[in-house]
Image (cartoon, rainbow, N blue to C red):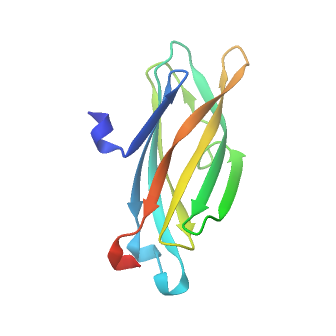
Amino acid sequence: MLDALFDEHATTEGVTVRVVTNFLDEQSSPAQNRWFWSYHIRIENHRDDPVQLLTRHWKITDGHGGVNHVDGDGVVGEQPLLKPDGSHDYVSGCPLPTPSGIMEGHYRFIRADGSTFLVEIPRFKLVAPATAR
């Protein structure tokens, strides 16, 4: 059922990342080569142990093939602890100089024993409606 609400999803080591995007016409200005999207991410822990999100890495590719890498601690200022069967939702945004692009990346999580692992963020498209080009 959740799959119908989200555009893309991927599961790595029992952690599922789901993504849905929304083009924000009111924050975009095609005449100034600026298109803006919000994206809603849900991270679900299907493991038997708690895990904590430490860092994020994004690879953002615009419609001309320009690539921008973004690294940072946590997500929107948080490093959520996900208990077994727990989830964390957040919304963020992405501006591009083109009416389309792609985002993908990974999160680094830490287990209770101190070991870390990477969780895939599925590749998702950012595409402005034809009326916003």
The N terminus - image quarter: top left
Query: Relative to residue 80, is residue 125 depicted above or below?
Result: below
Q: Position of residue 94 (x, y in %)?
A: 54, 62
Q: Position of residue 115 (x, y in %)?
A: 72, 19
Q: Nearer the viewer, residue 61 or 58?
A: 61
Q: How many labels does the image show?
A: 0
**Residue sitting farthest toward the right:** 114
Residue 9 image-quadrant placement: top left
Residue 131 image-quadrant placement: bottom left
Q: Position of residue 96 (x, y in %)?
A: 56, 69
**Residue sitting farthest toward the bottom:** 31
The C terminus - image quarter: bottom left
Query: Relative to residue 88, is residue 101 depicted above or below?
Result: below
Question: Going by the image, does 2 lie left or right of 68?
Answer: left
Q: Where is residue 98 in the image (x, y as percent from the top left)?
A: 53, 73
Q: Which of 128 and 114 is in front in this view?
A: 128
Query: Relative to residue 131, is residue 92 depicted above or below?
Result: above
**Residue sitting farthest toward the front:** 65
**Residue located 54% across and 80% down the image:** 33
**Residue located 52% across and 62% down the image:** 101
Q: Nearer the viewer, residue 124 or 50?
A: 124
